[in-house]
Amino acid sequence: MKRGMTLVEMLVALTIMMIVLGAIYSVLNIQQTKSLNVQETSVLQTDAQVALTLLRWDLFMAGYGITRHDPSIASTNNANAADQITLRGVGLGFETAYTDWAPVIERVSTSNEILVYRFNDSTPAFEVGDTVIVVDQEKRLLDSNCVIAQIDSIVHSVAEFTLDGLKLRINKAISVDKGSLVFRPDRDTYGNGIDYTLVNNTLMRGNQVFLENVEDIQFAYGVDLNNDGTFQDAEWFNELSSIPGYSPRMLYEHRTAIRSAFVMLSERRLRDYNYPADACTLEDHIYALSELDKKYKRNFVSAITWPRNIRD
């Protein structure tokens, strides 16, 4: 005679099953938490490195075509908040697509007139009153602050060929070779400069979002005042104006570097994680963290850049 399971046996079996399922869920939950933490960390590191590379390009290009007497870099140091920086002369960086340009089609020596190629475009590359810069084929600066006073359409003969061209009359005499390039940089980004500011954990480049989930950004400025080829601790400054005898030109007279650093913050609080310190320190900015703040994962990135155009 066969008999079924008793109620007690069924309850015991269900209890054992619940214990096993609970253990499995616990293991899966722990693994999911670890996976999410690893994913958050990976995203932080990737975003931080990409952003730092792009920021360094702007720092590298600062001062392109700006006279030595005019400030290529303006800094605002905030000991109790994020720093700000303005970089002038970076219009041939991300903004290259927004600039107008044309190659020089004939060599000139000490002349107020430059002959450039005229593209078959309904929108003119240059207009009277534009300020242009001239670079060689390697994009090395040849001259800047050239203001166009007059533009004439020409037909230029080269051996048996003819080219449609423009004769640009500018406000000063310069010497350029054929193949050099005349650029009209974006007025706002090149002349007025690009501002990097932090607003509500969002790093802004001008009025565009550059990077989100940034907790802090700080800059320091190194100037080799004694010209010994190294930067001593005393030769790093949190503000340009705090450099002894500072002037825009002095940055060209000594080796100059910019140290940029920022803190990336995870997009959400992480379970089973606590930041190991009670405060964050970045350059001269020290800020306390609450218990909730400690639940965010952080990634610190820093690099030193030598602006290529601020040197002799």
Image (tube, rainbow, N blue to C red):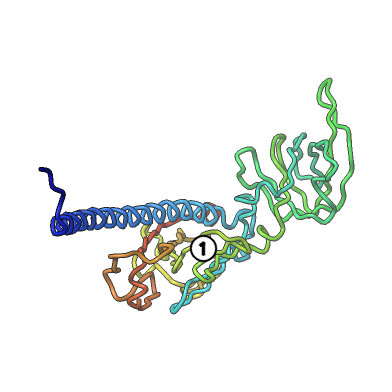
Q: Quadrant of residue 167?
A: top right
Seen in the picture, residue 283 relative to 37 is either above or below; the reply is below
The quarter of the displayed image where residue 161 is located: top right
Residue 234 image point, x, y percent: 36, 70
Image location (x, y in percent) of residue 300: 37, 61
**Residue at the image position 66 percent from the left and 59 percent from the top:** 189
Q: Position of residue 54 (x, y in %)?
A: 51, 52
Question: Where is 240 relative to 36, above or below?
Answer: below
Q: Residue furthest front?
A: 1
Callout 1 secondary element: helix
Q: Is residue 97 above or below residue 27?
A: above
Residue furthest to the top? 160
Viewer-proximal residue among 99 and 203: 203
Q: Amino acid at mark 1?
A: Leu
* Residue 218 visible in the snapshot: no
In the image, residue 134 above or below residue 286: above
Q: Quadrant of residue 69?
A: bottom right
Residue under the point 66% across and 44% down: 135
| Residue marked by disc 1 | 251
Count of residue discs: 1
Task: Tell me if residue 35 can be seen.
Answer: yes
Q: Residues within 10 Å of mark 1 (few under 14, many from 20)?
A: many
Q: Position of residue 77 (x, y in %)?
A: 49, 74
Furthest residue toward left:
1
Which of the pair 150/46 is nearer the observer?
46
Name the quadrant of the N terminus: top left
Q: Is residue 13 left or right of residue 294?
A: left
Q: Viewer-proximal residue, 62 or 250? A: 62
- Residue at image point 59% right, 62% down: 72
For residue 272, side relative to residue 259 (left or right):
left
